[in-house]
Image (cartoon, rainbow, N blue to C red):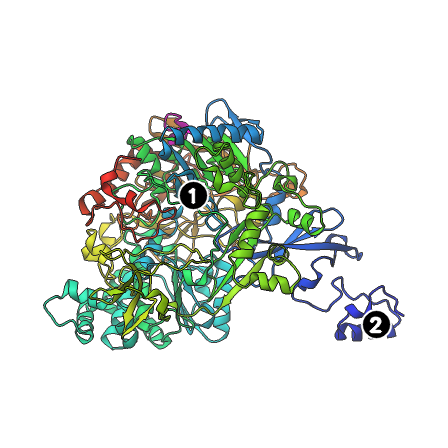
Amino acid sequence: MTKTDTSVKDLSGRVLAARAETEARGETFYPGASRIHLAAFPPKERWDDWVELDSKSWPKRVERRYALVPTTCFNCESACGLLAYIDKDTQQIRKFEGNPEHPGSRGRNCAKGPATLNQISDPDRILHPLKRVGARGEGQWVQASWDEALNDIAARIRRAIVEERRNEVMYHVGRPGEDGFTERILAAWGIDGHNSHTNICSSSARAGYALWMGIDRPSPDHANADVILLISSHLESGHYFNPHAQRIMEAKQNGAKVIVFDTRMSNTATHADHWLAPYPGSEAAILLAIANHLIQHGRYDREFVRRWWNWAEYMAAEHPQVPHTFEQFERELKQVYREYTFEYAAAESGVEASAIEAIAAVVEKAGTRLSTHTWRSAGSGNLGGWEVSRCLFLLNALAGAIATEGGVYPNAWNKFVPRPIHVSPHPRHWNDLTWPGEYPLAMNEMSFLLPHFLKEGRGRLEVYVTRVYNPVWTNPDGFSWIEMLKDESKVGLHVALTPTWSETAYFADYVLPMGHASERHDIHSYETHDAQWVALRQPVLRALRDRLGDPVDDTRAVNPGEVWEENEFWIELTWRIDPNGDLGIRRYVESVNNPGTKLGVDEYYAYIFEHSVPGLPARAAEAGMTPLEFMRRYGAFEIRKRVGALNEEPVPAGELSGVAEDPFGRVYTTAPKPPLLNVVPLPTPDDDPQGRRPVGVNVDGRVLRGFPTPSGRLEFYSTTLAQWGWGECAIPAYLESHVHRSRMAEDEMPLISTFRLPVHIHTRSANAKWLDEIAHTNPLWLHPSDAARLAVTTGDLVRVFTRTGHFIVKAWVTEGIRPGVVACSHHMGRWKLSDTGNRQMMRTVALKRSGTEWDLETTRLVTPFESADPDTRRIWWADVGVHQNLAFPVQPDPVSGMHCWHQAVRVTKAQPGDRAGDIAVDTQKSHEIFKEWLQLTRGASAYSPDGTRRPYWLLRPLKPARDVYRLARAGQQ
Ligand code: SF4
């Protein structure tokens, strides 16, 4: 019937018409490899056998048949859906594209998603466990077996546990990419050993949000907003980059106005209706000027403020002598912010008052459709940066744009963490190396101070595991990290779990290869919009074997070399720590179906999907699958759309037995907590003195759920800050940054070092050749007026002096930066010590040391090289930028604990002999600066109002048992 082999049932009407026309001309019709016309995505019904033409065989039409298997991207926190295209003939992954079934990313990815292909086929990736020989950091390795590594590590951890040296075991995570698996393993070991990168990343933003609503992240509903106010570059690289960016663009198409604060002209700023380039650190002053405008003109949602702010607590604490009416509060509110005029903000920020006023007018019109977001950016750059997110959220709180369509939700409401098969108890230990007494309000572990704490003799580590983390390169003050890691009296064993070579892995004892996005299991859920979803990252070749009825039970069987996945690794390690179960640890990794045997990942995930994800079993049954089969097949499941305002939900009568109410309407109950499937970590406001748990808040006579804050309301007034020694910051305020003009010398400029490049993450993207070709260097952004003053032009070398040393970098003269400010992206300057390691983005360097003085000098640039991938012969770049973080001292914010990244620098022309990328640092100076910043703290021993180390209600990853919070136990493990 036809000249082609295409069956009629596969063809759409348009294709049939096209075929008729073609055949009428007597030509052979080719319907397209997909057999349908212009499908946006392969329909999921055809994922078993998807046909496409081989691009490299063009102009011949060579068809390739694929099995499409979903997973999620591991290259940033967004966890967008990917579809692996697995060649059915070779069972090799040929590409990654978006998974249209993923509710967060909806089939779209940024460049880093498809570049997963480069990472898995990188000729320099680590394929086998390696053990160092020679001195640590000397760069000599031998291949080890997994058994050897596991037995050694397990024996040391067991010994530390048995000898009650539990605080000597530490796990330090970079990109988590999973919801709580490893925290539960550490809890099972009974250690307070979780360390994260968060205090060099987002702690200040978290602090600002947590102080308001208990929950430390926002979930902006960008798509439905009328006004979007961003303090960072969300469209190009921000938090939840692709899922948020696509929704921001949707809103723009619907007429939303976008306001961007960014001292630098980011790609996001180019899409803005209003772009402000404030002096770094002045952002909160602008936000308060906008807030003051709304307050003075009564342009706020009075009813929302009256019902949901804890204004009554504020009045009782700060204005006890006047009547505690809402009207009186409004009068006080006008008073307290009256000095934040547009002119004041203009003087602080250098932005014209008229521009700030224009923005205030736009914000004023947004009403409850005001979507705002800040994450790293200004919050992470400045002393007091946590006030940036706090003052930004103040605008939402005034507008009533919280948990509204187009507003901002607490992230925990738009996220679902399913209850797992085993729940480990809270550890009964407190680790002062990560949660030191000086920082009782720190949002996360004081991770970047570890070398200084060990230098001061505060402890040692027997086993230190870095996991997808590269503190030598990512953290400030990397030479102090090198000093610490090289000292075996301080770090007994360093294990690097990493898919790729990193600067930190060179100073490990074991380098253990872990999988990329298509080589590992993880479960996750993120606040990409007002909904709840879960997604499964999975080893796609293993999932395909399942689909074909040829299952494997060890992911190493399908991964390249001996690359493993972490779930199986942790289960195995835990088993070997407690092989007989005598420590009570083994039971947390035992099978429930077959007691006494090891838990497998199939059972682990099958349990979660069958028991803990509402709606999934029924949906899977409709599709004729088990819940695990469904997730392996489609990769994601949307549990709930439009979660809405959970604070407004009435507390059911069954939870209101034996209730009591405090003077401000916080309601407590004696009713037991109902069991939850969604175990997303939430703050835990204190019980009342009678031991009743907080259950809601009385709003106009009805007990509503409210927010997980001590008051149950949005905390305009933070009793926590007031009680823990920071009374002057009890309400949202503007704090002068450490790079405030008044603190800078005449010849100093602020250096912005926090911005990302859209195509890179941190360490792991260096192994993606497509991304490297697009971006491989990080010049210093310099305004023409500054360039003229310094007599430099684009491409000239400059010296940038910090307080601990200097680095050499090329200048890029651009009007895209505020005069008097310089900027340098933190993605570049990768290095290696020998030929071992990444060759496309890491230059080879020599580290020279004289006492506490260090130099990093380039010995070989990046050059083309021979490998199985012909593209490595085509590498055309040699300059891979500068590792500026090495020259930054630690600058911990005394409240949030965040490293304040901005630097006060002097920039000069380079000196004779200077070479791009060279760095010099004195770690003694950095230790002195550590001590200077320590003086800013108000520690628990002097300021704790109740004899505890930290407010119990605040979020903490891996929260210890309640009684361990008591300071009386200090010194005990
Ligand atoms: S935004 Fe890009 S890097 Fe991040 S998860 Fe999505 S595709 Fe991956």
Q: Earlier in the sequence, mark 2 or mark 1?
A: 2
> Which dot marks residue 776?
none
Q: Position of residue 278 (x, y in %)?
A: 33, 60
Write down the residue under mark 2. 22
Q: Is label 2's Cβ within 8 Å of ligand 1?
A: no
Percent across and percent down for residue 693 are: 30, 58
Q: Nearer the viewer, residue 750 or 140?
A: 140
**Image quadrant where one finds the C terminus:** top left
Instruction: State yes or no: Cβ of the residue under disc 1 lies below 8 Å from any atom of ligand 1.
Output: no
Binning the other alpha carbons within 10 Å of mark 1 as few (below 14), some (14 to 19) or many (20 upward) gives many
850 sits to left or right of 18: left
Which residue is painted at 28% across and 48% down in the image? 893
Question: What SS does tag 2 mark?
Answer: helix
Q: Is residue 941 above or below residue 401?
A: above
> What residue did someone put label 1 on?
809
Amino acid on which disc 2 is placed: Thr
Q: Indicate left or right for 155 with 803 as reference.
A: right
Q: Is residue 209 above or below residue 426?
A: below
Q: Residue furthest left?
A: 321
Q: Nearer the viewer, residue 231 or 44?
A: 44
The Cα atoms of the two marked residues, 2 and 1, are separated by 60 Å
- Whether the magenta-drawn stretch holds residue 824 is answered as no
Residue at image x 49%, y 57%?
525
Give the crowd class for mark 2: few <14, some 14-19, many >=20 residues within 10 Å: some
Residue 971 is left or right of residue 199, and the answer is left
Q: Classify residue 481 by image quadrant.
A: top left
Query: What stretch of residues is rendered in magenta?
Result: 483-492
Q: Amino acid at mark 1?
A: Val
Residue closest to the eye, 501 or 148 = 148
When asked about the image quadrant of residue 15, the answer is bottom right
